[in-house]
Amino acid sequence: MHHFSLVPVFLLTALATACGSVGIDGSATELDANALGSGRITGFELLDATAGASLGALPEILILSNYQTTQFSIRAIVSSGSTGSLALTLDGPDTDNYEHTEKWAPYTLAGDGTDADGNKTYVGRTLSVGTYTLTASFSNDTKTVTFDVVTRPSVFRLVNTESGARTRIAADQKFDVEDWPSAFSIEAAVTASAGVAISLLGDSNSDGAY
């Protein structure tokens, strides 16, 4: 004689929801472990991956000679109450659209851990010279920033003082003044101990003062 046990349908549904689904071929299909959480992304922090230390807010222009480390990470700063996974992508000269999902805080670019002494460390990477685009995404919020990596202070930006818009320019780049905003400034990336002199050279027929 065979004995059967009846299991309520709602229990089977609950088990399937908790454990994942079963494919037609009988193979188990896991739930998406990288489903994004929810929260607000308020900024980004640059990290010394080896020392496990903060290097301050991620700058618009990152000058490699300013830092003693060559291994960097970046942490997405989120508001209190943010929960669940956050996706990070980095597109740059040597990243090939790098993607990483952190399942809980701290939300860092490549994960975190501890050293033999129990001190916090981060998985780091070198950053080649060039322009990078970093994006962090929750299911309900996305923040994207662009930053430049340089080896020395040779980056300048033309600043529209009315709108605040910034345009990267080369040290020897030539411009038609008529294309410039009516009110502008120029900023340079410099190391903490360095000074900088900025000169604008115009031709003899220019009506502008330089």
Image: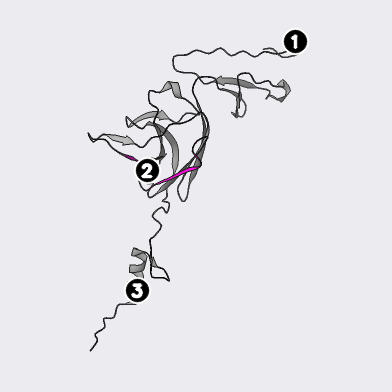
Amino acid tagged 1: Ser
| Label 3 environment density (alpha carbons within 10 Å; few <14, some 14–19, many ≥20) | few
Residue furthest bottom as drawn: 1
Amino acid tagged 3: Phe
| Residue 10: numbered disc | 3
Tell which circle, 3 or 2, labels the residue nearer the N-terminal end. Answer: 3
Amino acid tagged 2: Ser
- Looking at the rendered structure, the secondary structure element under dot 1 is loop
Query: What residue is shown with label 1?
Result: 204
Query: Which mark lies nearer to you, 3 or 2?
Result: 3
Q: Quadrant of residue 77?
A: top left
Tell which circle, 1 or 3, labels the residue nearer the N-terminal end. Answer: 3
Tell which circle, 1 or 2, labels the residue nearer the N-terminal end. Answer: 2
Viewport quadrant of the N terminus: bottom left
| Residue 70: numbered disc | none
Where is residue 189 shown, x and y percent of the image? 52, 21
Q: Quadrant of residue 120?
A: top left
Q: Residue at x 47, y 28 (%)?
A: 59
- Looking at the rendered structure, the secondary structure element under dot 3 is helix
Image: magenta residue range: 94-112
Q: CA distance from mark 1 to mark 3?
A: 86 Å
Q: Residue at x 49, y 23 (%)?
A: 151
Q: CA distance from mark 1 to mark 2?
A: 59 Å
| Label 1 environment density (alpha carbons within 10 Å; few <14, some 14–19, many ≥20) | few
- Looking at the rendered structure, the secondary structure element under dot 2 is loop
| Residue 80: numbered disc | 2
Left or right of residue 10: residue 152: right
Left or right of residue 145: residue 163: right
Query: Which mark lies nearer to you, 1 or 2?
Result: 1
